[in-house]
Amino acid sequence: MPALPTGDPVPADGALPSSALATIADTEFALYLHVPFCRVRCGYCDFNTYTKPELGGHGATIDTFADAAIAEMDVAQDVLTAGGANPPAVSTIFIGGGTPTMLPAADLVRMVAAARERWGFADNIEITTEANPDTITPEIAVELAAGGFTRVSLGMQSAVPSVLATLERTHDPANVATALRACRAAGLAVSLDLIYGTPGETLGQWRMSLEEAIDLEPDHLSAYALTIEEGTKMGAQVKRGQLPTPDDDDEADKYELASELLMDAGYEWYEISNWSRGPATQCRHNLGYWRGVNWWGIGPGAHSHVGGVRWWNVKHPAAYASRLAQGLSPAHSREVLTAEQRSDEDILLGVRLAQGYPIASLPHKGRGAIAPLIGDGLIGGRAALRGSIVLTQRGRLLADTVVHHLING
């Protein structure tokens, strides 16, 4: 797992500068809850997660996590209302991990209820939990729906057993359909997460995964290119030559295949790695990140952003629980973003969206890059004439290059 970034110290109570709270009432507010538990650690994963043997029963365990998370909500409530600030009702909640559904459904529901008690919920709130397909039963789906959840994101990753084995995913591929049906019967929207570019995965195997996912008719699909992270088991296997190094051209072919098949099946891309049946089934929580809303991240290692201040919690569940037990903020360190940093991040995130990024919001030096980017086929000429930067399919594959030129000229 990567180390936490360095930053400035955080006051013991987590207090934010008054400037960060000045406009909090005018900006959408979201919550992210990071549940850091997994049955096994997948070889490719560098997320802040822990198996039961690694924890040894100390700190914020599966049994005590909900209480610790609710204690952090109390910290958040104090911080966000300091000096008479008035945060808006919560617009979206996303519970990720790890495997959130390793917690009892009752605990997931209890955390959602605690958020409602402190901030209230916006009309038509979106509440999502990620889930391993093996952990969803009809009874759990009903309990989640009754507790206010609106959406479940199932970690399908692949339909091919050999690919799942390389990823060290433990779920039964057949349980994806079973879990999806259970969620649908309970009235929950369903998203499927897929990964392409696993070492050894063929284009035909990726097509099989896409076709099986499409046949299940989810409301939403995400398709992410596998990144080999240094310090992971898979990273070491690739370095030793035990697994082949992913190939950029292969990943480009797989992205293009995903785009083709999903669009043919009636899905619209709205962000580089995400497709939905239409605006009503887009992931509003993730859209909030890309549009720069305020959010509070709850849990070990979780990141937050409010009013241009970004901070991150201590990583280990034991340290996290200990700080909260002492009435302290679990924040490790933070940074106050400059106007230039906020502008750069707005471009970095906003360009990823199908709706595009307004040319009028670009720095002057970046506007000179528009014509060459159109000439290279990376952004749409017609959209630019209408005042927006919109990536072409080729541009989606080279989004980092586009962003570099829009920021630096």
Image (tube, helix red, strand yellow):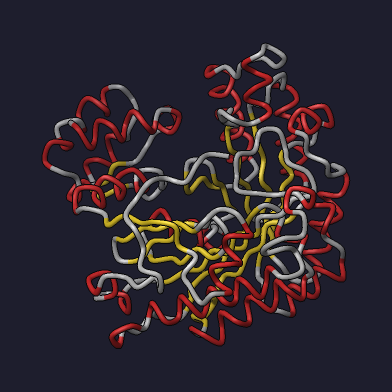
Of all residues, the one furthest to the top in this rendering is 241
Q: Measured from the top left, where is residue 375 in percent x and y?
A: 26, 23
Above or below: residue 100 compared with residue 249: below
Q: Quadrant of the C terminus?
A: top left
Q: Is residue 268 left or right of residue 199?
A: left
Q: Measured from the top left, where is residue 278 in percent x and y?
A: 55, 56
Q: Quadrant of the N terminus?
A: top right
Of residue 244 and residue 83, the one placed in the foreground of this image is 83
Q: Residue at x 21, y 46 (%)?
A: 359
Q: Residue at x 40, y 74 (%)?
A: 13
Q: Quadrant of residue 78?
A: bottom left
Q: Residue at x 77, y 54 (%)?
A: 56
Of all residues, the one furthest to the left in this rendering is 364
Of residue 207 and residue 121, the one placed in the foreground of this image is 121
Q: Quadrant of residue 293?
A: bottom left
Q: Is residue 221 left or right of residue 77?
A: right
Q: Is residue 4 left or right of residue 63?
A: left
Q: Measured from the top left, where is residue 158 in percent x and y?
A: 74, 36
Q: Measured from the top left, where is residue 406 in percent x and y?
A: 24, 36
Above or below: residue 395 compared with residue 20: above
